[in-house]
Image (tube, helix red, strand yellow):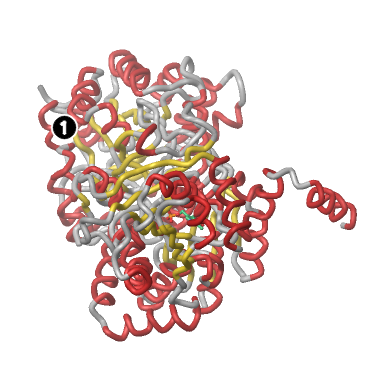
Amino acid sequence: MASAIDERCRALRREGRMGLMTHIVAGYPSPRKTVPIARAMVRGGADFLEVQIPFSDPLADGPTIMGACERALANGMTTKKALAIASELSSGTGVPIVLMAYYNTVFRHGTARFCADAKAAGVGGLIVPDMPLEEEASEHFMRSCKASDIYNIRVVSPASTDLRLRKNARGAQGFMYCTARQGITGARRELDPNLSSYLRRIKRVSSIPIAVGFGISSRAQVQALSGHAEIAVVGSAIIQVIERQGRGGEERAVERFVMGLRRG
Amino acid sequence: MNGHFGEFGGRYVPEMLIPALEELERTYSSARSDPDFRKEFTHQLKSFAGRPTPLTFAANLTKRLGGARIYLKNEGLNHTGAHKITHCIGHALIAKRMGKRRLIAETGAGQHGLATAAVAARFGFSCRVYMGAVDIERQRPNVFWMERLGAEVIPVRFGSATLKDAVNAAIKDWIENVGDSYYLLGSAVGPHPYPTMTRDFQSVVGREARRQILEAEGKLPERVAACVGGGSNAMGIFSGFIRDSGVKLVGVEAGGTGTADGRNALRFRSGTVGVAEGYKSYFIQNRDGQLSRTHSIAAGLDYAGVGPELAYLRSRGRVEFASATDSEALSAFTALSRHEGIFPALESAHALAYAMKVAPRMRKSDALLVNLSGRGDKDLFIVARALKDAGFSSFLRAEGRRR
Ligand SMILES: Cc1ncc(COP(=O)(O)O)c(C=O)c1O
């Protein structure tokens, strides 16, 4: 069966437009609201949903996503409940779901079992930022992804050397997740001026679609990526919309914001 | 050097940090085999930190307990008050070699932060220290001293606002500033090559202690005990005896106020294997792998993880683990003060408490070596409160009124 991620990437190419992946922390702002807000993202025009399983010690995340993780955990979110949320979204929204987790979440669940459970939940790919290629020999994470027929989405950064870009590209499936800057997650106004040369470096080593995330918060930034990448990823900026909105009306606000990222 | 200690250790970090860790590993490898580097390190240890530290026979305590002969490796006599300055000098020299201009550190008790601030001042780095807001409350004097040394101390308010959160904040700073900044991690934890580097730098403690006790006793000790937060002082002293299979090595964890969840930092008893903060080891965590709250009267032991090499040595049966509670550590603090004229750091008092428990059961001809990782001056406020010292609290009230 063709992967929903690949199909969506092909459709984007056919339509000649930039894809949009929106991010949400499972259990944020509350376990009940995650799914309706994610649906609002899809109504607003999201092509992919990235569902993050909250972790107590998220190394790559800035204050906004960290705060969302803390809140989700305080709300009683667990790995099992997060997988159930992913499952609800994969069957109800029609867009591919990728699951983002830190490796301890995967490891504690049992690496092979996590991959199998994510697959059963209808997840198309896994983003595990702190699982580098070098630990594969101990963890068999990529092997478990293969065994469960779920994509292992590699994350690279502007600091990655060409050699490391090539190594990561070799194991990459679906798309490469390229951080827009050397740094942690968090909404920013400007894109890194060196971004296009870094994305060109990736294009030279691989023909896999490129998703760019970290710091993207506006339509202008999304547009600036066109021609350099296939998918723009927006995370912290949406959490900020939810925080500003307060209780009630988050769905409308998120839908409007996501629509604005696409159409202005 | 491959960074794995059996199933433990490794380098579980985002891709963004891999190039920086590879560069650090290369620089350290070349420095390690460079005689000039070793000479400079040894020179700084001697002329700045005050090494070698003495080995002190605790004659009165030994007599009172009526068992093994107790020796103290007095790391508290190092400049800045603990063993931490030793690896800080090593790391600072590496940072200089790499052309870095800024040091980033996390701190729990404030001892590592203080030592980092001191080497930053001495070697000309700017310095930022992350410290949990809870730890700042209990170790305020060290914040004051770090600031006098020119460091910027940033309170960390997220998570449990203790050491693990300070580590997270420091790593995030490093991710943002890898170009000009050096992350001076405070213990034998974190992603490769940190556990190896910190152990190597601290191994001077074990080499000195081995030589000193052979001189004093004419034989090796039966046991060596050290408190274990992340494992820097323990790996330092243990590495001197690791090949002496007859020497029993004992790591002492913080028993806090009991065995219930959140009341201790017993990683090997309450914890399970996990991956966090860049390495695989034992962590106190829930079923889903969320790190849990920990507690110890000693901020330096109040940490959810433990060094990967110690996890490995335990799995091989080479290092055993014991624990001491908050109140046992306080009693040991009082005993050492009264009977030997030495204030131990509350962290080190845990190792001492263990020694006081087992010494009476050992033979009189046995030698028991305790790593006294630091001195207790920094714990003035905690000890005064724990001992309910009325004079000190009325002084504090008066001091409050004077400002
Ligand atoms: C005096 C002293 N001993 C021990 C420790 C615990 O750290 P480690 O286990 O790395 O020696 C600390 C940490 O702050 C400390 O200040």
Quarter-of-image position of residue B194: bottom left
A6 or B187: nearer the viewer: B187
**Picture coordinates of residue A224, whole percent (x, y):** 39, 49
Residue A22 visible, this angle: no
What residue sits 49% from the left and 76% below the top?
Answer: B49
A236 or B314: nearer the viewer: B314
**Picture coordinates of residue B354, whole percent (x, y):** 44, 46
Residue B119 vertical position relative to residue A113 in the rendered view, above or below: below
**Picture coordinates of residue A96, whole percent (x, y):** 27, 25
Tag 1: amino acid: Cys
Residue B33 visible, this angle: yes
In the rendered view of the protein, which quadrant contains the N terminus of chain A?
A: top left
Residue B236 vertical position relative to residue B391 in the rendered view, above or below: below
Horizontally, residue B337 falls left or right of residue A142, namely right
**Ligand 1 lies under 8 Å from the Cβ of mark 1:** no
Which residue lies under the disc numbered 1?
A145
Residue A90 vertical position relative to residue A98 in the rendered view, above or below: above
Quarter-of-image position of residue A259: top left
Label 1 chain ID? A
Q: Secondary structure at mark 1?
A: helix
Residue B71 vertical position relative to residue B280 in the rendered view, above or below: below
**Picture coordinates of residue A115, whole percent (x, y):** 20, 27
In this rendering, the count of numbered labels is: 1
